[in-house]
Amino acid sequence: MGLNMKIGRSIAAYSLIVGLFYLVFGLLELVNGLSQTFGLKWAITAVNPAIVSPDIFSGVTLAIIGLIFLFGVRPQWMANKDAASYLAVGTLLATVFFAVYLAIMGSHAVGWGVYHIAPEPYADIFADWAEWIWLDDLRPGIWLFALAVPGLYYTLKMWLSRKKNP
C-alpha cells in the first residue's frame, strides 16, 4: 500500500509531533538520571521528578523511540513507498514500552495489596510497597502512549489491508 501525498504529509506531521515529545521527555529523563547518578545538582532542580523520573535507561529508550518517529518524517513527507514502516516501528516500540511499564505498575500494585492483606509475619516481606501509590509509577512512557495510539490504529489498519491484498 503506497502513500498518497496527502496521507504521507499527515503522517509526517503526526510523526514529527509524537517524535518530538518522545525525544524531549527521553532527553529530560536521561539528563535527570545522569544528574542524580553523578550528583549534578543544577539538573535535578531544573526537572520535576514527579513528571520526569530520573531513569537513564528509560530516557535512552524514549529518545530512541522519538528518533525513529523523527527519521520517518522526510520519507513520509515525500510519500515514499516504505515510509509508513517508521511509523509502524515507532508505534510498536511505544506499545512494548507501555506494556512493560504497565507490568511494573501491576507488580507494585500486587505487592501493595499483599502487604495490606497478608497476616503480620508475611506482610514484612512486602513492606517496601506499604506506602506505594500508583502516581509513583506513572512515567512518561505510559502517558506518552496516548499520543502513539493513532499511529497504532493506522499501523494495524495498514497491516490488515496488506493481509487482505498481498
Image: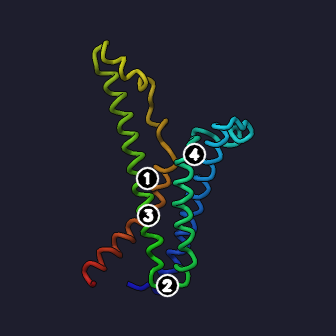
Q: Residue at x 37, y 28 (%)?
A: 112
- Read off the residue under disc 1: 97
Question: Where the N terminus falls, by quadrant?
Answer: bottom left
- Crowd around label 3: few <14 · some 14–19 · many ≥20 (10 Å): many
Q: Which mark is residue 56?
A: 4
Residue at the extreme front: 38
* CA separation in Å, label 2 and label 3: 19 Å
Q: Residue at x 28, y 19 (%)?
A: 118
- Read off the residue under disc 3: 91
Q: Disc 4 or 1, which lies upstream in sequence?
A: 4
Q: Quadrant of residue 82?
A: bottom left
Front-most of 14 and 24? Answer: 24
* SS for callout 4: helix
Q: Nearer the viewer, mark 3 or mark 4?
A: 4
Above or below, comparing residue 114 to residue 21 in the picture: above
Q: Disc 4 or 2, which lies upstream in sequence?
A: 4
* SS for callout 2: loop
- Read off the residue under disc 2: 80
How many numbered marks does the figure carry?
4
Q: Disc 2 or 3, which lies upstream in sequence?
A: 2
* Kind of residue at disc 1: Phe
Where residue 117 appears, x then y in whole percent? 29, 21
* Kind of residue at disc 4: Ile
Where residue 50 appears, x then y in whole percent? 57, 38
